[in-house]
Amino acid sequence: MPREVVLVSLMFTTEFVNSMQAIFGNTAARTEVDTLMDFYRGLLARLPDNSGFNFWVARFRNAQCAGTGAVTAQAESISSQFALGSEYSTRTRNNSQYVGDLYNAFLRRGGDSAGVQFWINQITSGALTREQVRQQFVASPEFSARVAAVIAQGCLTAPVAPTATTSAASTITSTGATLNGSVNDMGAATTVTFEYGTTTGYGTSVAASPSTVAGGARDVSVAATVAGLAPSTTYHFRVRGTNSAGTTLGANQSFTTPAAAPWHRPPPPAQRAPSPRPAPPSTAA
């Protein structure tokens, strides 16, 4: 059995837990915090930074206010971003270590010898990919019970307003352009539009594509194609995201449409040269 699996098994024994409580006191936390901390510890092998912790726990807590399906979706989404992210990838874990990390992060324990070896063999033999094994852990009764506990913990705070970032326009012509941006719903379904006009008062609103961002709490690219613009004109625009917690406006961006192509009178149709007159017949004797 991998040494790290043995170490985690010892870390969660009653004896060790009681020893730590004797030193630090009762450190019980809400279940969504425990779950998130396990992702940090089990997959990234570190404590969270403040901004990262606040971001991820806000996603869980928004979902707790939205209902059972939202929490289940967030448990899958957050865990996949930890397991498939660049930080975990740079740890270059072998198959044995990867399986140990899944037990640590998802089940909050070390694995039993038979179970650990089974999952290692599944990956090594090619029967399952690493991602497929992670999904098996997510769907396991043991982790499902942890998610149910997060659901049962209930809503702690109101949903958080979305984030919105306006990006540069593209495909700019004399009469049209594509407006770009990104929106993070922060766990609550968000309606997305773009505002645009010739001043920062904007004046015109158009639905983005997609027009609704929901259930992901990650940055989603959005865009809108606008037409009927005036040539040689500067336009201002911004993305706007609205969910149950409020509205967030992206920063202003601008672009200038090029001049319309000059009109040229078409040349007259070419005239055909007259056909040569046939020579008169010879009158020679």
Image: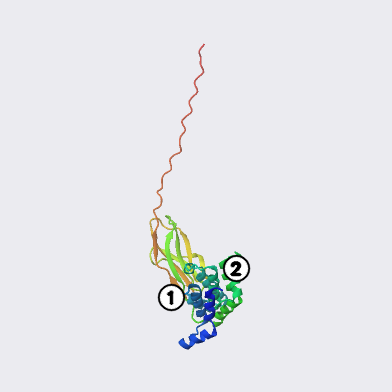
Q: Where is residue 159 drawn, in percent x and y? A: 49, 77
Residue at 51 percent of width and 87 percent of height: 18
Q: Position of residue 166 (x, y in %)?
A: 43, 66
- Residue 102 location in percent, x, y? 55, 73
Mark drawn on residue 49: 1
Query: Where, quadrant-wise, is the N terminus in this rendering?
Result: bottom right
Depth check, front residue: 71 or 122:
122
Residue nearest the viewer, comparing 265 with 240:
240
Is residue 224 or residue 228 the one in the foreground? 224
Amino acid on which the number 1 mark rests in the picture: Asp
What residue type is disc 2 on?
Answer: Asn
Residue 166 visible? The answer is yes
Quarter of the image for residue 71 reads: bottom right
Q: How many marks?
A: 2
Q: Position of residue 216 (x, y in %)?
A: 52, 70
Q: Is residue 265 above or below residue 18?
A: above
Is residue 148 shown above or below 209?
below
- Please report the residue visible at 49 percent of the width from the left and 87 percent of the height from the top: 21
Q: Quadrant of residue 136?
A: bottom right
Q: CA–CA distance between discs 1 and 2?
A: 35 Å
User: Which numbered marker is on residue 175?
Assistant: none
Q: Which type of secondary structure does the marked residue at label 1 adopt?
A: loop
Name which of mark 1 and mark 2 comes first in the sequence: 1
Secondary structure, mark 2, is: helix
The colour scheme used to paint the residues is rainbow
Mark 2 Cα shell of 10 Å, populated few (<14), some (14-19), many (≥20): some
Q: Which residue is mark 2?
A: 121
